[in-house]
Image (cartoon, rainbow, N blue to C red):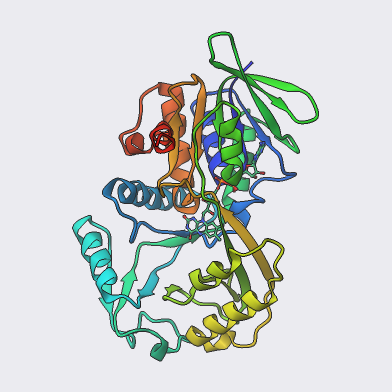
Amino acid sequence: MCDVVVVGAGIVGASVAWNLTLAGARVRVLEAAPAPATAASAASFSRATAFGKPPRAYFDLNHAGLRELHRIGAQGAPGFHPCPTLLWARDPDRLDADLARARQWGYAAEEVAPDAPAVPRGVDRAALSPRVVRLPDEGWVDLPAMAGWMVDRARREGAEVRFGARVERILTDAAGAVCGVALAGGGRVDARTVVNAAGAGAEEVAGLVGGPLALAPTPGLLADLPLPGGVDAMLLGPDVSVRPAGPDGVRVRSDGVDARLAGPSGEPLDSPVRDLIERAGRVLPGLRGTRPTAVRVGIRAFPADGGSSVGFLDAVPGYYEAVTHSGATLGALLGRLVADEISSGGRPDLLTPFSPDRFHSMATP
Ligand SMILES: Cc1cc2nc3c(=O)[nH]c(=O)nc-3n(C[C@H](O)[C@H](O)[C@H](O)COP(=O)(O)OP(=O)(O)OC[C@H]3O[C@@H](n4cnc5c(N)ncnc54)[C@H](O)[C@@H]3O)c2cc1C
């Protein structure tokens, strides 16, 4: 019997598995896909930030997540790219509120003029509204690189990692406690704890133990565009967001374009992609008329109340949930906190408000 089965090898499952092996646990990772980080973790804007993320408990968790990325990056983990954000908004009141909260809660944020040297070369400064906020301590995460590295490290520390292994049942004993999982196509793995890190598949996995997790999955379109020389800041406007993606490219997305994806699935992407490139070209004219090097649609595993769902479920001993829609910011930190809680039994303070048990009351009218 192993101690812990981790379901899913996206950034969250990879980080949980790595940290559990460091804590000395016998870990088995079961991933339905043929490789790590092929779902949301491969189709993410992946900006690490706590800005504009109230309430205070959620901000604190994300702020700690950002610090954790700096910490593991300094220790040699690959994938985190520190990079300031420049942000401007259509709604000055909201910007004021976010800025005031950030300052009050100790988050580095400063106002800069659109013609300040901090605005990267190549940006059409006229496209920035007069009020621009600079967030100097943020960054973006190459999630496949980081998750792949964590899976390798977990393996070196003794974890067994199986790809093409879809969990279709969670097994419980006569007392109702978790005792293992059954795989599609046959086979079972015995374990005392099962961690649900299945991303957009987490609601289905939670359903295997009658867990009340409710997700509101939302699609997001991402296009990678060529830009010789790249850009050295993340640019977040009301119409489009742009972040570096390698030395000669950027990744772009837009809430406005994503709203158009909510229609029937299978809708051709040509027109939303054109819209995205047009919006990006208004901020970085060098992007006008470019052809994407990659286009992806990712599904965010959005817990229905907008928080994360992290912790043991009271009713099913041994079942643990690790689900978030801010996995780029939180993945590295959650891995450490979850491993801490599972191996020591003590609940980290930062996780207290995010228990999966809260979905029981959401489900009760
Ligand atoms: C468009 C978009 C933009 C985003 N932007 C940001 C951002 O700017 N900042 C930020 O912090 N976050 C962002 N996110 C969110 C972030 O990318 C995700 O929270 C993170 O990647 C989730 O990681 P995960 O490991 O939980 O899930 P995933 O990466 O989806 O991994 C889950 C894994 O579980 C496996 N699985 C599912 N069911 C089973 C099963 N039954 N058995 C075995 N395996 C199973 C899947 O195959 C998958 O590999 C964004 C997401 C999207 C889609």
Q: Mark yes or no: residue 194 visible.
A: yes
**Relative image position of residue 92 (x, y in whole percent):** 27, 76
- Total residue callouts: 0
Identify the image quadrant of the C terminus: top left
> Which residue is at the front of the view, 192 or 73?
192
Above or below 212: residue 141: below
Above or below 165: residue 121: below
Residue 364 sits in quarter: top left
Residue 89 sits in quarter: bottom left
Q: Mark yes or no: residue 144 visible.
A: no
**Relative image position of residue 40 (x, y in whole percent):** 60, 53
At 28% from the left and 71% from the top, the residue drawn is 95
Above or below 60: residue 44: below
Identify the image quadrant of the N terminus: top right
Looking at this view, name the residue that lies furthest to the front: 365
At 44% from the left and 48% from the top, the residue drawn is 330
**Relative image position of residue 317 (x, y in whole percent):** 49, 19
**Relative image position of residue 284 (x, y in whole percent):** 51, 84
Above or below 277: residue 71: above
Residue 204 sits in quarter: top right
> Which residue is at the front of the view, 170 or 162?
170
In the image, taking residue 165 as reference, residue 350 lies left or right, namely: left
In the image, taking residue 135 as reference, residue 46 lies left or right, namely: right
In the image, taking residue 346 as reference, residue 324 lies left or right, namely: right
Looking at this view, name the residue that lies furthest to the right: 185
Looking at this view, name the residue that lies furthest to the left: 104
At 50% from the left and 41% from the top, the residue drawn is 214
